[in-house]
Image (cartoon, grey):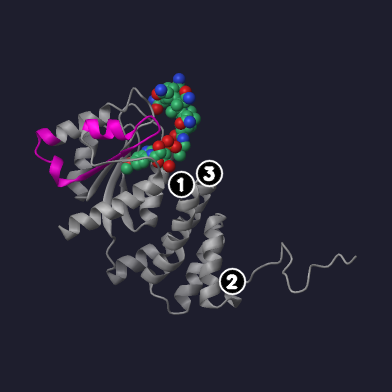
């Protein structure tokens, strides 16, 4: 029996030369590389597509956002887990870092803006960071107020950045009530209806989201990005 690979099948570890691929195959390969969290390859693919005359927003949408959409589906369905998604998000950021100045230059508008942070008393940031990255992948500009965010920090960020969405994360049953403090303070100051408010975090559920007056409870980062996209589109259409 021969130990050579069957016919024309490439060997498992055969190196793929991105520059040798046509645009369609390169885009498909970038989806795979994003899925596998290969930041260097994503940066190389992004530069290659740009060098072939692709507009920055086309590279963003067809190569990166589409790749991240596939990652998001498998994350939602339990096929990919947090470490893989963080690597994919990191790879996406490598491409975004190249595209960001070009997008700004050509005046391509983000589809919306979100201020996001983990609430006061809570330093869990992995889920919040994933949501931020997924939001970036979906085309949002993200302002991250980090962790342990007090109501005044949220309000200052809303005032300064004028986002469409306020996103809040909480991982502790002791900190999740603080979301209501933020929403109530916004209501007291007549700001509540100016923003779409999305909340998430492991101990939350839909009932809690409804009870505190959020516009949406997001079970995971993929749902958060989907919900944000749909709600901003609806707000723009209204
Ligand atoms: Co802590 N911790 N922790 N912890 N920790 C939990 C949350 C806990 C459930 C563990 C347990 O006991 N089983 C428990 C809470 C119990 C409770 O409240 N009933 C707990 C505790 C008790 C604590 C301490 C109090 C422990 C101590 O010191 N005695 C302490 C509190 C510190 C503080 O915040 N003040 C503490 C500390 C820590 C570490 C620092 C060690 C570390 C955090 C590191 C970091 O974040 N940089 C940590 C970790 C890692 C966890 C667990 C193990 C994992 C959390 C995580 O990152 N999950 C956690 C147990 C668990 O949840 N299974 C636990 C992965 C992440 C991707 O999921 O954050 O749920 P998640 O985010 C998801 C969704 O929820 C949603 O999308 C994300 C992605 O799909 N989502 C949003 C989240 N935020 C969103 C915001 C949105 C939308 C969607 O806005 C639009």
Q: Position of residue 187 (x, y in %)?
A: 12, 35
Circles 2, 1 touching at the beta carbon (< 8 Å)? no
Question: Mark 2 or 1, which is nearer the eye?
Answer: 1
State which tag comes first along the sequence, 1 or 3.
1
Q: Residue at x 19, y 50 (%)?
A: 162
Asked if 135 appears above or below 175 in the picture, the reply is: below
| Along the line of sight, the residue nearer the viewer: 47 or 222 | 222
**Whole-number angstrom distance, CA of label 2 to CA of label 3:** 27 Å
Which residue is farthest right? Answer: 1
Q: Is residue 45 found left or right of 227 in the rendered image?
A: right
Asked if 100 appears above or below 154 in the picture, the reply is: below
Asked if 152 appears above or below 133 in the picture, the reply is: above
> Which residue is disc 1 drawn over?
76
Q: Residue at x 79, y 67 (%)?
A: 5
Question: Residues in magenta?
Answer: 187-212
Residue 106 part of the magenta-drawn span: no
> Which residue is disc 3 drawn over?
81
- Indicate which disc residue 233 carries: none
């Amino acid at each position: 029996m021969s130990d050579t690979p069957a016919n024309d099948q490439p060997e498992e570890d055969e190196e793929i030369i991105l520059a040798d691929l046509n645009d369609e195959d390169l885009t498909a390969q970038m989806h795979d590389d994003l899925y596998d969290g290969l930041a260097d390859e994503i940066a190389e693919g992004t530069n290659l597509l740009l060098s072939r005359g692709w507009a920055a927003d086309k590279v963003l949408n067809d190569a990166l956002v589409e790749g991240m959409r596939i990652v998001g589906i498998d994350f939602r369905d339990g096929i990919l887990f947090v470490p893989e998604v963080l690597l994919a998000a990191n790879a996406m950021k490598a491409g975004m870092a190249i595209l960001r100045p070009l997008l700004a230059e050509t005046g391509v508008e983000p589809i919306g803006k979100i201020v996001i942070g983990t609430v006061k008393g809570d330093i869990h940031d992995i889920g919040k960071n994933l949501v931020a990255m997924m939001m970036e992948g979906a085309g949002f500009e993200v302002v991250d107020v980090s962790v342990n965010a007090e109501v005044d920090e949220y309000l200052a960020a809303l005032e300064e950045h004028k986002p469409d969405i306020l996103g809040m994360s909480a991982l502790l049953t002791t900190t999740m009530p603080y979301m209501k403090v933020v929403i109530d303070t916004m209501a007291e100051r007549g700001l509540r209806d100016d923003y779409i408010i999305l909340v998430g975090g492991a101990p939350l559920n839909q009932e809690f989201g409804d009870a505190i007056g959020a516009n949406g409870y997001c079970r995971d980062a993929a749902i958060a990005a989907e919900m944000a996209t749909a709600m901003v589109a609806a707000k723009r259409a209204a």
